[in-house]
Amino acid sequence: MSIIVRRFNLLSKELNTYFCSLILLFVDMSVTVEIHNNSSLTKEQLMHTINNFDQQGEMIGNGYRNVIKIVTINGERYNIKEFKVPNLVNKIVYRFFRKSKAERSFLYAQRLLNSGVLTPTPEAFVEFKSAFTFGSSYYISKQLDYDFTIRKLIDEPECEDYDNILRQFTQFTYHLHESGIHFLDHSPGNTLITKSGEDYKFYLVDLNRMDFKTLSYDERLANFARLSPKDYMLDIISDEYAKLIGKPHEEVKERMYFFSQKFSSSFKKKEAFKKKYFFWRKKKR
């Protein structure tokens, strides 16, 4: 009997060691840190900042999905975006099959700059991974002091230089399209604007969803759909874009209206669905 007990205890220890090792494969995280060649940041500075991310920095927004903070490192202001940890399926997808949102943001920022499209200077990205799953990730860029976003034109239709700003923004978007850049999150808060004399400079942010290809006519016009359901905005945008693309204004305007209404209807249905079936979800932070 004592032999059986000893063997059972030995087997229990072996199983315990096995399962502990298995758990560590999923829990024990390795760290990937990539810093841009032109950045003055060091790995030590970055890891110190990431490890203390919850206790420092100035929060931008409510942090419901992703947490964005302005953090000062060695006298310089940086914008650090902590992406929401993915669900179980995406933990595996991002670990083995797809680049993370942080890495895509870092790579796309460089590609934009190489194409003559402005975006806050990319500095680094950080990822935490286990052997089989993906954990948290961070994208770090220089903090840009900007004057306003496109949202101002929605909230303040009587703002100074309204028509000029909107036409220059349309020219900026046309340049994206001509450069083969399909910015999938082309929404009011994702273009930062600075004024430079009589001109305006436009900077893209929230970069992880982007395609690089030749855009079709409809894809170009549909790319404005997320910006605003306001007809007076689309009237100006469609007028300017029609001139740039060499198409009749009424034709361009009609298609822009169609795509804007389609997006607005789809968005409202999704929000109603979430409100009805995901009412139990609590906002993060």
Image (cartoon, grey):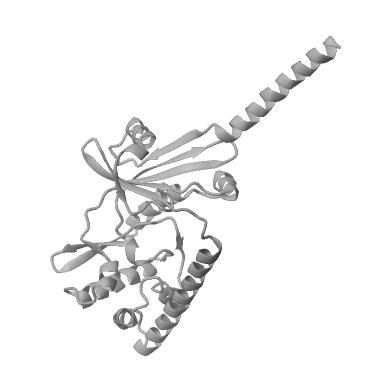
At x 47%, y 71%, the residue is: 267
As drawn, which residue projects farthest toward the right?
Answer: 1
- Nearest the camera: 171 or 7? 7
Question: Where is residue 228 shown, x and y percent of the image?
Answer: 35, 74
In this rendering, position of residue 211 left or right of residue 141: right
Question: Where is residue 159 shown, x and y percent of the image?
Answer: 19, 73
Question: Where is residue 12 shown, x and y percent of the image?
Answer: 74, 21
In this rendering, position of residue 266 left or right of residue 46: right
- Dividing the picture into quadrants, the one containing residue 173 is bottom left
- Dividing the picture into quadrants, the one containing residue 116 is bottom left
As drawn, which residue projects farthest toward the front?
Answer: 280
Would residue 146 be seen by someone viewing this image from the given angle? yes
In this rendering, position of residue 272 left or right of residue 168: right
At x 44%, y 51%, the residue is: 104
Question: Where is residue 208 shown, x and y percent of the image?
Answer: 43, 55
- Nearest the camera: 238 or 270? 270
As drawn, which residue projects farthest toward the left?
Answer: 197
